Image: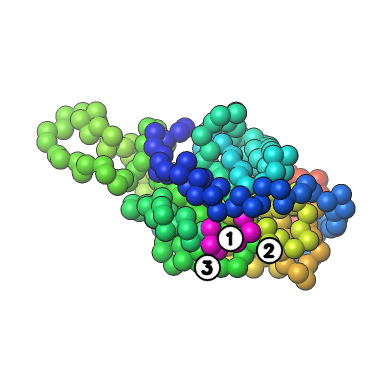
Amino acid sequence: MKTALRVWHGLTAVLSVALLMSTALAHAQTMPADEVTQVEDVIVDGAPIRSEVQRFVGTVAAPAPNRGPARWDGDLCVGVVNLQTEAAQFMADRISDIGAELGLRIGGPGCKPNLVVMATSDGAALASELVRTRPREFMVRTGGASLGREALEAFQTSDRPVRWWHVSLPVNEDTGLAAVRLPGQQPFAGGPISRPSDLGSYGITVMPSRINNEIKDELQQVLIIVDISRLGQAPFDQVADYTAMVGLAQIDPDVDMSHFQSILNLFRTDEALPSGLTDFDWAYLRGLYEARQMNISARGRVGEVAAQMERALRARPTELNEATP
């Protein structure tokens, strides 16, 4: 189900700023290197899958405060700017293919991007300029939309090769409408109420349960900035998988994944390069997109993702199943 709202109305202007700042990159990008370092299949050394899954989910998930993990619902339209046409198409197709594998509808040519990847030679400068010129596109004045001001400061000042910013909203599963009042939306004025329709867009369905409800968290817009000057020797196809992982799920940018085989270890200098999304990465994404996400508590929703991730791992005919208790 799709919400009737777009929180980044100025996305075209954001893209324009990025293009003006990074035109020098137009001919600097190359396609993936032919040589790719392969890593061995994932093996959990004697640890039960369940405990490994819980540790993985607890490490990687970064939902908005007091909210469950958000995901895309319905249409996904990927836009990539400041790369050569062939490289940009490769990255957009890779992210879209992974999204389609998770059950998303992929927008065709001319769709309005809601997941945007921008390449630049100075990630911090581009991030700072975008936040300075479009502050309300990053800090949406409503609950459960982003990680907050401290995270936004880190988005602008970090030296990460890839940085990202998610905007999500709690949405009513039945109506597809935001479950919180949005900037510019008038408060409910009250008056006689004799039927649910009297509440207009403020009416929501409430389940008679202390455990579950009908509110789910949906990604609305994602911006990813790729700093070409900091990619090092990372092959382009692995970079594309990395951007897919952080674009399709709310990933902690400060996560330490050294105990797991994951594409999120791509820029760790002391690790062998992963060949792409690993079994754990795929299982996490499948767990996120297959979980019902109806638990009333944020912790319970994280647990639902972990349970689905465990099922996904156990269903795969890999060495992982040797660790089954």
Residue type at numbered disc 1: Gly
Kindly tell me whether residue 239 is visible in this rendering.
Answer: yes
Q: Residues within 10 Å of mark 3 (few under 14, many from 20)?
A: some
Q: Residue furthest bottom?
A: 270
> Could you say where residue 26 lies in the image, as x and y percent from the top left?
67, 47
> Could you say where residue 211 lies in the image, as x and y percent from the top left?
41, 49
Out of 236 and 18, give the one closest to the viewer.
18
Residue type at numbered disc 2: Arg
Q: Which residue is drawn at 31% across and 45% down?
A: 182
Kindly state the secondary structure of the residue where label 1 is placed: helix
Magenta segment includes 75: no
Task: Choose the circle earlier in sequence order: 2 or 1.
Answer: 1
Task: Choose the circle earlier in sequence order: 3 or 2.
Answer: 3
C-alpha gap between disc 2 and disc 1? 9 Å
Quarter placement of the C terminus: bottom right
C-alpha gap between disc 3 and disc 2? 14 Å
Q: Which residue is drawn at 60% across and 32% down?
A: 106
- Region in magenta: 120-126
Q: Which residue is drawn at 30% across and 47% down?
A: 183
Which residue does the numbered mark 3 point to in the structure image?
157
Which residue does the numbered mark 1 point to in the structure image?
123
Query: Contact, CB < 8 Å: mark 2 with mark 1?
Result: yes
Which residue does the numbered mark 2 point to in the structure image?
230
Q: Which residue lies furthest to the right in this view?
A: 35
Q: How crowded is mark 1: few (under 14 residues within 10 Å), some or many (20 or more)?
A: many
Q: In which quarter of the image is residue 270?
A: bottom right
Q: Which residue is drawn at 28% across and 34% down?
A: 201
Residue type at numbered disc 3: Thr
Query: Contact, CB < 8 Å: mark 1 with mark 3?
Result: no
Kindly tell me whether residue 241 is visible in this rendering.
Answer: no
With respect to residue 183, does 51 lie above or below? below
Out of 143 and 121, give the one closest to the viewer.
121
